[in-house]
Structures are given as structure tokens and as C-alpha cells.
Image (cartoon, helix red, strand yellow):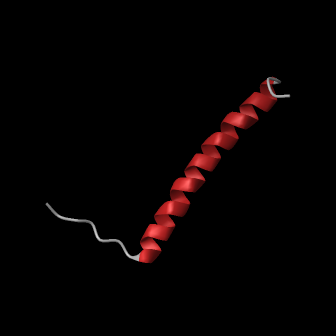
């Protein structure tokens, strides 16, 4: 079994990418609610 060794910079970039994906997904869901008129 090999262990993946990441530098601090790699971990930072991976965290930013994951948070960006979640933010974009939530923003898209929220925008669809606004467009459909379901959000007050």
C-alpha cells in the first residue's frame, strides 16, 4: 500500500478547489430557485 504524500501547497489548493465546487453547486441551486420564483 502506497501513501500519497502532499505538500502544504497541494493540500491548500485541493481545499480551495473543493470549497469552490461546493460554492458553485449551491449558488446554481439558489439561482434556479430565484429564477423559478420559489425564494422569498
- The correct choice, above or below, for 24 with respect to 1 in the image is above
Q: Position of residue 29 (x, y in %)?
A: 67, 34
- Residue 2 position by quadrant: bottom left
Asked whether, in this view, residue 18 is left or right of residue 30, the answer is left
Q: Residue at x 64, y 41 (%)?
A: 26
Quadrant for the N terminus, please. bottom left
Quadrant for the C terminus, please. top right
Q: Position of residue 33 (x, y in %)?
A: 75, 29
Q: For the view shown, which residue lies furthest in the right direction?
A: 40
Asked whether, in this view, residue 20 is left or right of residue 32, the answer is left
Q: Position of residue 28 (x, y in %)?
A: 68, 39
- Residue 6 position by quadrant: bottom left
Q: Residue at x 43, y 71 (%)?
A: 10
Q: Position of residue 23 (x, y in %)?
A: 63, 49
Asked whether, in this view, residue 37 is left or right of residue 12, the answer is right
Q: Residue at x 81, y 28 (%)?
A: 39
- The correct choice, above or below, for 27 with respect to 18 in the image is above
The total number of labels drawn is 0
Q: For the view shown, which residue lies furthest in the left direction?
A: 1
Amino acid at each position: 500500500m502506497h501513501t500519497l504524500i502532499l505538500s502544504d501547497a497541494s493540500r491548500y489548493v485541493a481545499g480551495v478547489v473543493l470549497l469552490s465546487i461546493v460554492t458553485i453547486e449551491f449558488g446554481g441551486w439558489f439561482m434556479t430557485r430565484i429564477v423559478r420564483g420559489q425564494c422569498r
